[in-house]
Image (cartoon, rainbow, N blue to C red):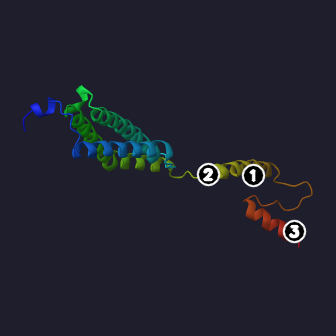
């Protein structure tokens, strides 16, 4: 192929140009969806998809603008190298997205999951009663010998307290 093809302006807008133009609009729409409409609650995948959405949106809009300028037959943009540059950038973004999905994302997801082990939605709820139980146990420990000489109350937790309460109220 002759390199003069890339720098010679060609005002014709044929089938390859239409495919490029429509593909850039599809890329821009996909980027807008991932950026603004897709909701992912995963704290690793959500931001990664949002960043991919921004890249797709910018690349798609830039390609659509170049396609529109070529369709309008504005002289510098009728050269084929503009479409070639956008196609190479699109392929580079696809390669990076596949690389990220195969090699970077699994490591980040595993690191996040490792940091979340032992934590849960109920962990915060459980920690508060545990602190209260520790305070109650310390109060029970201080009152080991009741004033009336009765047997000391069990201090092994809520279950034992409920058992003791049932035993006393029969």
Tell me the element at label 3.
helix
Q: Residues within 10 Å of mark 3 (few under 14, many from 20)?
A: few
Give the spatial CA distance, label 3 vs label 2.
33 Å
Question: Residue 44, which numbered label?
Answer: none
Give the spatial CA distance, label 1 vs label 3.
20 Å
Q: Indicate the quadrant containing the N terminus: top left, top right, bottom left or bottom right.
A: top left
Considering only order in the chain, which callout, 1 or 2, is on the residue closer to the N terminus? 2
Q: Residue at x 79, y 65 (%)?
A: 162
Q: Residue at x 49, y 42 (%)?
A: 36
The answer to the question of whether label 1 and label 3 lie on touching residues, with beta carbons closer than 8 A, is no
- Name the residue nearer the viewer: 59 or 78: 78
Q: Residue at x 32, y 45 (%)?
A: 22
Front tag of 3 and 2: 2
* Residue receiving disc 3: 168
Q: Left or right: where does residue 117 sit relative to residue 88?
A: right
Q: Residues within 10 Å of mark 1 (few under 14, many from 20)?
A: some
Q: Indicate the quadrant where residue 148 lies.
A: bottom right
Q: Where does residue 62 sit, x and y in percent of width and height?
A: 34, 34
* Residue receiving disc 1: 137
Q: Where does residue 152 sit, x and y in percent of width and height?
A: 82, 59
């Amino acid at each position: 192929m002759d390199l003069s093809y890339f720098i010679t302006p060609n005002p014709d807008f044929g089938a390859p140009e239409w495919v490029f133009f429509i593909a850039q609009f599809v890329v821009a729409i996909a980027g807008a969806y991932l950026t603004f409409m897709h909701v992912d609650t995963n704290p690793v995948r959500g931001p990664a998809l949002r960043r991919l959405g921004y890249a797709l949106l910018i690349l798609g809009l830039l390609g659509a603008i170049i396609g529109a300028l070529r369709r309008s037959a504005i002289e510098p943009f009728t050269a084929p190298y503009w479409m070639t540059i956008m196609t190479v950038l699109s392929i580079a973004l696809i390669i990076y997205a596949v690389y990220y999905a195969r090699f970077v994302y699994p490591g980040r997801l595993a690191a996040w999951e490792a940091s979340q082990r032992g934590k849960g939605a109920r962990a915060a709820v459980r920690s508060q009663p545990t602190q209260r139980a520790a305070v109650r146990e310390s109060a029970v420990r201080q009152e080991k010998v009741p004033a009336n000489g009765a047997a000391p109350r069990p201090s092994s937790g809520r279950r034992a307290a409920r058992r003791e309460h049932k035993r006393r109220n029969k």
